[in-house]
Image (cartoon, rainbow, N blue to C red):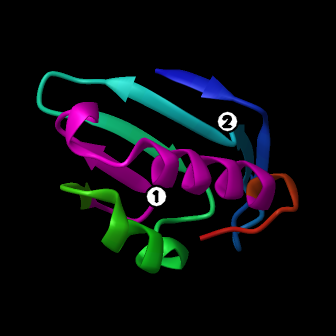
Amino acid sequence: MVGFGRYHYTYASGRKGSYFRVGFSPRKANLTGYLMDGVDRYRKELEQLGPHKTAISCLYIKRLSDIDMKVLESIIRQSFTNAAMGEQV
């Protein structure tokens, strides 16, 4: 996993932790992108991205050549900024 920035969070239970603001992991099945502000807010952008799958904070892409890199860059930049402002899933 490769991550950028630092993201601090606190659960309702009071447990605290930190993680990266955005990151990725080149896995066997997919390239996985991690967006700490979640993927739901990017529904319009994701419609333009190309073939992908999502989970709560994960974006799964099989091949970078199949997607619109400008859309991916926009999503990553927005997520990085939102996570810095403490916006959470």
Quadrant including the C terminus? bottom right
Whether pointer 1 and pointer 2 mark residues with C-beta atoms closer than 8 Å, the reply is no
Q: Residues within 10 Å of mark 1 (few under 14, many from 20)?
A: some
Image x and y of residue 7, in percent = 76, 44
Comes first in the chain, label 1 or label 2: 2
| Amino acid identity at mark 1 | Ser
Place of residue 18 in the rendered image (x, y in percent of width and height, measured from the top left): 73, 40
Q: Residue furthest left?
A: 29
**At 17% from the left edge and 37% from the top edge, which residue is drawn?**
62
Crowding at dot 2, Cα within 10 Å, few <14 / some 14-19 / many 20+, comes out as some
Question: Residue 5 at what x, y percent from top left?
Answer: 77, 32
Magenta residues, start to end: 54-82
Residue at the spot of label 2: 20
Which image quadrant is residue 17 in? top right
Residue to which mark 1 is pinned: 57
Tell me how far mark 1 sits from mark 2, CA to CA. 12 Å
Q: From the viewer's side, name the closer residue of 78 and 36.
A: 78
Asked whether residue 1 is drawn in magenta, I would say no
**Left or right, 42 with reference to 8:** left
Q: Is residue 52 above or below residue 20?
A: below
**Disc count in the image?**
2
- Element carrying mark 2: loop
Left or right: 43 as drawn, with respect to 47: right
| Picture residue at 46% right of the left edge, 58% below the top | 57
**Which residue corresponds to the image point at 68% horizontal and 68% vertical from the top-left?**
88
Amino acid on which the number 2 mark rests in the picture: Phe
In the orientation shown, which residue stands out farthest toward the right? 85
